[in-house]
Structures are given as structure tokens and as C-alpha cells.
Amino acid sequence: MTAETLNFIDGRFVPSSSGRLFENRSPVDHALISRVHEAGRPEVDAAVAAARAALAGPWGRLSVQERAAMLYAVADEINRRFDDFLQAEVADTGKPIALASHLDIPRGAANFKIFADTVKSASAEFFEMTTPDGRTALNYALRRPKGVVAVICPWNLPLLLMTWKVGPALACGNAVVVKPSEETPSTATLLGEVMNAVGVPSGVYNVVHGFGPNSAGEFLTRHPDVNAITFTGETATGTKILEAAAGGIKATSMELGGKNPSIVFADCDLDNALEVTSRAVFANCGQVCLGTERVYVERPLFETFVQRLGEIARAMKPGRPDDAGSGIGPLISLGHRDKVLSYYARAKEEGATIVAGGGIPQMPAGLAEGAWIEPTVWTGLPETSAVVREEIFGPCCHVTPFDSEDEVVALANDTQYGLAASVHTRDLQRAHRVAARLDVGLCWVNAWFLRDLRTPFGGAKMSGIGREGGLHSLEFYTELRNVCVKL
Ligand code: NAD
Ligand code: 6OD
């Protein structure tokens, strides 16, 4: 019998009251994984009401230390059930087990510990003042939870990106209603079991399944009793959610799309630049918001760099998640593959030189129905091409030569997005100079994806609003209340 994925509301797993179920299919071979119970307005209302009630219950009375201890227990329980989470995440996404076991699941657990530590060590603002009648007053700022937080998640790093928001939201004393991506409903649901197992009060963590417009996503973001919305996903979706938030003056945190450049100067450590750039382009089958889709290489190195990046792309063998020899998994779905392939077709029509890939790989029997795609490298397109301007979110990049620092900074900044960039050079003065001139939220030098989780994370321009990470997350997930005491 096919498994069913239920909503998690007020500590219980609940079916869809409308009886509407949708299919969750494997990107590897299109096999049916589970049938998911779609939440309608009644489930979303119930989840928000449960979250509101939890704030008024024992959860709302826990000390910071008690909450932090509970989040440590959540992390430990995720680690105890590591294999269950791994299996669920890999089934939904098709990503290599090696990747999910090193990145997605460990970070899913760590996000709870990191923010438990952050909230315990956060200091308060304090000001002493002289009053007009010559006495003294003390001001201090209390951090209070925002209230009910809607957490709207994407499918590319489902557990990692959800816990990146749920961890700090709960550390700050909020209650959450999570809407996972319809493509990846499993690990958010499994986390409900963890919450119950470690005694997180019912209603603190809720999950509603469904889609965006006229479904759980929209019902949740327009709900009048939601205080804040934290969203990761496409810029176009972010626009819709901001519209929904405006009506209720809800606080929003927006982690959106990108078209991230990597800049490779001729004096770089070439082997390192190639290793880092190929990871930035192909990791997770190119489905990483921070991933590189535009590579700019200083002209003396251009031919060599392109040839070697092409060799790396051609050497990547797609395969099942448990195939140790596979370098790349499938895209998330056939629908997403159609979108990525439309850019592959466009690059061809516009006369790009296809250095590697460009199509669908030959897959053995049993995998042919999956969302497989070739890692692809192009050159020769103008900067005005949609392939160079729009986020594709696939394992592909366009490589352009440049001749000067000023030219490459202008090229890199010539985009509506501003999420991330990488700069490769041995000249550290130049590295600092260029990093300061790029209009992005995150800039790496001779590296990619490397991050201390206390640092600010977020995008400039149309890549987002706000910063999360460390104390920046506390800024979003708490309301500051100033108390002024006249002595
Ligand atoms: P998406 O925007 O299609 O969907 C994200 C979530 O929003 C899903 O849960 C979806 O059901 C929901 N949703 C869609 N329409 C909605 C609506 N009108 N109201 C409420 N909810 C709605 O994004 P995706 O395809 O799942 O993820 C890929 C995108 O996410 C890429 O653009 C990528 O760059 C971006 N992303 C950004 C970051 C970041 O940190 N900046 C991280 C990961 C992914
Ligand atoms: O590492 C993280 O915390 C993070 N938010 C990564 C985002 C990756 C985007 O796909």
C-alpha cells in the first residue's frame, strides 16, 4: 500500500478534511513515494490556532535555558534517527546519499543547537539616563517572541533550510506553522515525531502540506493571526508573499533567488578555482540558491579554465543516490527539468558554444523516467541573453572572458539579483577591493558555501530582504520591548 503523508497539527498527525491528496514522486525514477494530504483552510486555521494556544501555554512560560535544553534534545533526536531523516530526504530529492549525509541532515540537527546557544548568549541593550528632574532612569530592552511564525520552504535543501528558520524561531519562544514544498513534504513531517518524542508542547511546531496559490501557502501567509512570515524561495513567489503580508503588516524575512557570479583572475590557484567553481555550479544538481551560474574568467586563463571545467562536467556521472560512483543526482522534478531544458534550448538557438552537456543523459533501464540532466557549460552568449540574466537553478553555467577589474565588477553587478559571489585570486588586496564593490549579501574569496553560522546570511537587491544567521536571526524572530524604570 502506498504511504500517506499527513499534516502535523497540535501534536497530532491529521488527514486532509477535504479528502484532497497529491502525489509525491521520486525524481530518480518517477516512482510514487507517498500520497500527501493537502491542508485546506480548516487545517491552516487549526494549525495557527494551535500555535497561538501554545504561546499562551507552558511553552510561553519556559525560561531561555529550558527552551534551549529542549532544542538540544530535538537535535539529539534527529541525530538518533539520522537514517530515517536521510532516507526521507533522499527519497524526496533524489540527491546523492553522500551529500545528504554530510550536509542536509547534520545541518538539520545542528541548526537547533546553534540557535539554542545563540539565544542563551544574547545580551540585552541597557542605557542609564538622567531624568529632567535630576533623577536616574534605567532603560533595558526585553526580547519577546514575535508570536505565530509562518515558515514557507523550498525543495532544494528541505530539512536544512526549514530548520534554519524553525531553530531560531523556537529558540526565541515563537510557535511555528511550516509549509514545506509540495515536492519535499517528508522530513518536515518526520520532525513532528521528533517534537513529540522530546516533549515539545503540542502546537509549538505544526506542518501543513499543499501548494502556494489558493492552497496552504496562501491561506497561511494571508492568515490574520500570523505575526511574521519567513520565506525561502523564488523571487516571484516572494513578491506574492509580500503582497499577502502587507495586508496584515506582518514582519517578513525573504531569502530569494540569485544569478551568482564567480570571478576568476589569472593569478588564482587554478586547481582550487576549478574545484570550488565546479562545486558551486554542479553541487545538488545546481539547485543551490548560492550556486554559480555566471563565471567570468580573466582572458589569459579563459581557454584553459573553460577546457578544464568542461572536462569536469563531462566526467560527472549521474546515478542513483546510493551509487558511490555517481557525481550528480537528478533535478527535483520533470517539471523543473522542462524549465531548465528550455534554457538549454535557448542557449543553442542563440548560438552558444556548448563546451559540455546540453541535454538529457542516457540512463539505464529503470532510471529513464527520472528528471536527469547533463551538467552543462556554455560560452559565447551576449550578457543580454536570458541564459545569462535569469536564474535557471540547474547544473549549468556560462563562462565569459574579461580584461580588467573595473569591467568584471560592472559585469558581475549588472543583474537584478544580489545574493552571492566568489572571487578567485592570490592578490588579497584585490580580493578585498572587489568584495567591497560587489552588490551582494555574501562574497567568498577562493571559496564557496563556507560559512560560520553566526554570520549574516541574505541577499541584496531582488535576492531578498533582511538577514538571518546568529544574532541577525534573533533580530527577526523577536520583538524588542524597551522598559524604562525611573529610580
Ligand atoms: P518557490 O518559490 O516555487 O516555492 C517555495 C515555497 O513557496 C513552496 O513551499 C511553495 O509551495 C510556496 N509558495 C508558492 N507560491 C506561494 C504563494 N503564493 N503563497 C505562499 N506560498 C507559496 O521556490 P522553490 O522552487 O521551492 O525553490 C527554488 C527557489 O528558491 C530558487 O529561486 C532559489 O534561488 C530559491 N532559494 C533561495 C534561497 C536563499 O536563501 N536565498 C535558498 C534556497 C532556495
Ligand atoms: O547554509 C545555510 O544556512 C543556507 N541558508 C544555505 C542556503 C542555500 C541555498 O540554497
Image (spheres, rainbow, N blue to C red):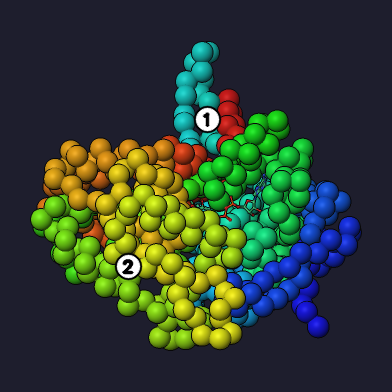
Residue ID at (27%, 41%): 411
Callout 2 crowding tier (Cα within 10 Å): few <14, some 14–19, many ≥20:
many
Q: Is residue 290 left or right of residue 116?
A: left
| Quadrant of the image containing the N terminus | bottom right
| Relative image position of residue 15 (x, y in whole percent) | 85, 65
Residue at the outermost top position: 133
**Residue at the disc numbered 1:** 138
Q: Amino acid at mark 1?
A: Leu
Residue ID at (89%, 59%): 17
Q: Is residue 157 above or below residue 217?
A: below
> Of 285 and 203, which appears nearest the observer?
285
Residue ID at (13%, 45%): 403
Quarter location, residue 66: bottom right
State whether residue 395 appears in this view. yes
Q: CA distance from mark 2 to mark 1?
A: 66 Å
Callout 1 crowding tier (Cα within 10 Å): few <14, some 14–19, many ≥20:
some
Q: Amino acid at mark 2?
A: Ala
| Quadrant of the image containing the C terminus | top right
**Residue at the disc numbered 2:** 356
